[in-house]
Amino acid sequence: MEAVILAAGLSRRLGGGDKLLLPVGGEPVLARTVRAVRAALPTLPCTVVVPATGLVRELAERLGVRVLLNPDAAEGVASSLRVAVRAAVSPPLLLFLGDQPFLSPTGIRAVLDTARTSPGLFMAAPWYRDVPGHPVLLGDNIFPALLELTGDRGARSLWGSLPERARRRLAIDAEPPPDLDTQEDYQKLLNLVPESTDGTDRTDRTDGKGELGDG
């Protein structure tokens, strides 16, 4: 199994700048997301897909993760999926988004448990109170279809074409993890950073006992 973080988007809705470089709690959004994924899944390889050039690539290369370059990032999310699939080293993939630094341990645990108990699935994903979210489990049996995607079609665009036995919808009774598309979203993320009495933020939601406390 491999954690893949998609971080090659163009931040079109932000109104200027790259959202993954914005500071949240003293570190860029992407750095916080990578740290959260690695804390939640310390035994899994972690890969980040980034544009071929620019500051996001430079940041990712300093984070101690495997970095994949997407020279076609302007095409849309499908291009990043193709890069990840072609370079997959340990399927299935657990797909995360670089602009979601506040992960849901419940959602991750549900997807992990499903991956371990239902190895033949093409896709599984959490629905947070009926809102589809991440991480998305992608089995290697869906890789050929992912390679055919173009433009801004993501993996979930294939959901309806899969037989019910090949997909698993995981109901999570919690709010979906917030993502970052607009300046308003950014302000909401800033409000989620709790402060400790010594002025440092405390946002690591795992308990240090392996993968989400299960290890």
Image (tube, rainbow, N blue to C red):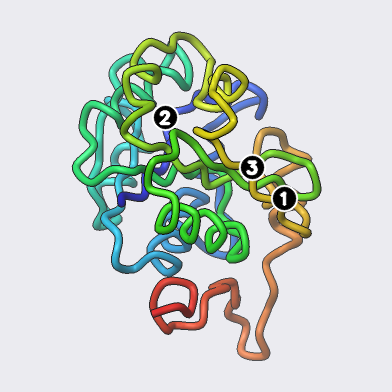
Q: CA distance from mark 1 to mark 3?
A: 14 Å
What's the amino acid at mark 2? Ala
Q: Nearer the viewer, mark 3 or mark 2?
A: 3
Q: How many marks?
A: 3
What is the spatial separation of the Cα atoms under label 2 and label 1, in whole angstroms?
22 Å
- Label whose residue precedes the other's in the sequence (1 or 3): 3
| Up-down relation of residue 150 to residue 84 (above or below) | above
Does residue 162 appear in this view?
yes
* Residue 203 to residue 171: above or below: below
| Amino acid type indicated by mark 3 | Arg
Residue 121, image x, y percentages: 44, 39
Viewer-proximal residue, 68 or 43? 43
Mark 3 residue crowding within 10 angstroms, few (<14) / some (14–19) / many (20+): some
Circles 3 and 2: CB distance less than 8 Å? no
What residue lies at 48% left-to-right and 79% top-to-bottom? 213
Seen in the picture, residue 11 relative to 183 is either above or below; the reply is above
Secondary structure found at label 2: loop
Dot 1 and dot 3 residues touching (CB under 8 Å): no
Provide the residue designation for mark 2. 8
The residue tagged with tag 1: helix, strand or loop? loop
For residue 144, what is the image quadrant?
top left
Instruction: Say which of 8 and 5 sits in front.
Output: 5
- In this rendering, is residue 74 above or below 155? above
Q: Residue 92, how many percent across, how many down?
A: 33, 43
| Label 2 vs 1, first from the N-terminus | 2
Q: Secondary structure at mark 3?
A: strand
What is the quadrant of the C terminus in the image?
A: bottom left
**Left/right of residue 58 with respect to residue 17 in the rendered view:** left
CA separation in Å, label 3 and label 2 = 26 Å
Residue identifier under label 3: 169
Name the N-terminal-most of marks 3 and 2.
2
> Residue at 53% across / 58% down in the picture?
108
